[in-house]
Image: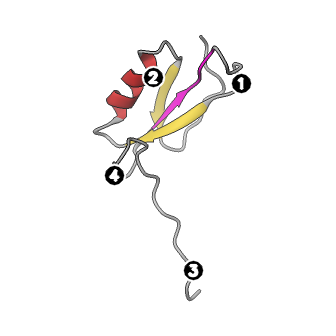
Amino acid sequence: MIGAQQPSAPRCSRASCREIAVSAIHWRNPRIHSADRVKTWLACGEHVEYLRNYLASRDFPVEVTPVGESVDGLVG
């Protein structure tokens, strides 16, 4: 189809990074989110540990999966 845009690849959530994401970082803030409310950030290979550590240092439950995989909930 002429003029149709192709879906873009998922991009890293780190500020100013435009690399393709390879990991999904699932997290929640247990002080304000129920166990079924999980947020997801995407990360390139360079930033996955940085973003995971940023969230974990705040005592948020965090789980890292490949992009496209989900989690049922996070304990914590």
Label whose residue precedes the other's in the sequence (1 or 3): 3
Q: How crowded is mark 1: few (under 14 residues within 10 Å), some or many (20 or more)?
A: few
Instruction: Report the Cα–Cα distance between label 4 and label 1.
Output: 29 Å
Q: Name the side, left or right, on which 4 lies relative to 37.
A: left
Q: Residue furthest left?
A: 46
Q: What x and y, as percent, mark residue 28?
A: 59, 23
- Range of the magenta residues? 24-30
Residue 19, disc: 4
Of discs 1 and 2, which sits in the foreground? 2
Q: In which quarter of the image is residue 13?
A: top left
Q: What residue type is labelled 2?
A: Leu
Of discs 2 and 3, which sits in the foreground? 2
Say what secondary structure mark 3 lies in.
loop
| Front residue of this view, candidates 4 and 33 | 33
Label whose residue precedes the other's in the sequence (4 or 2): 4
Q: What residue type is labelled 1?
A: Asp
Q: Identify residue for label 1.
A: 36
Instruction: Report the Cα–Cα distance between label 2 and label 3.
Output: 37 Å
Instruction: Report the Cα–Cα distance between label 4 and label 2.
Output: 20 Å
Residue 4, disc: 3
Q: What residue type is labelled 4?
A: Glu
Residue at image point 35% right, 53% down = 18
Residue 6, disc: none
Label whose residue precedes the other's in the sequence (4 or 3): 3
In this rendering, the answer to whether 22 lies above or below 2 is above
- Tell me the quarter of the image containing the N terminus: bottom right
Instruction: Report the Cα–Cα distance between label 4 and label 3.
Output: 23 Å
Q: What x and y, as percent, mark residue 5?
A: 53, 75
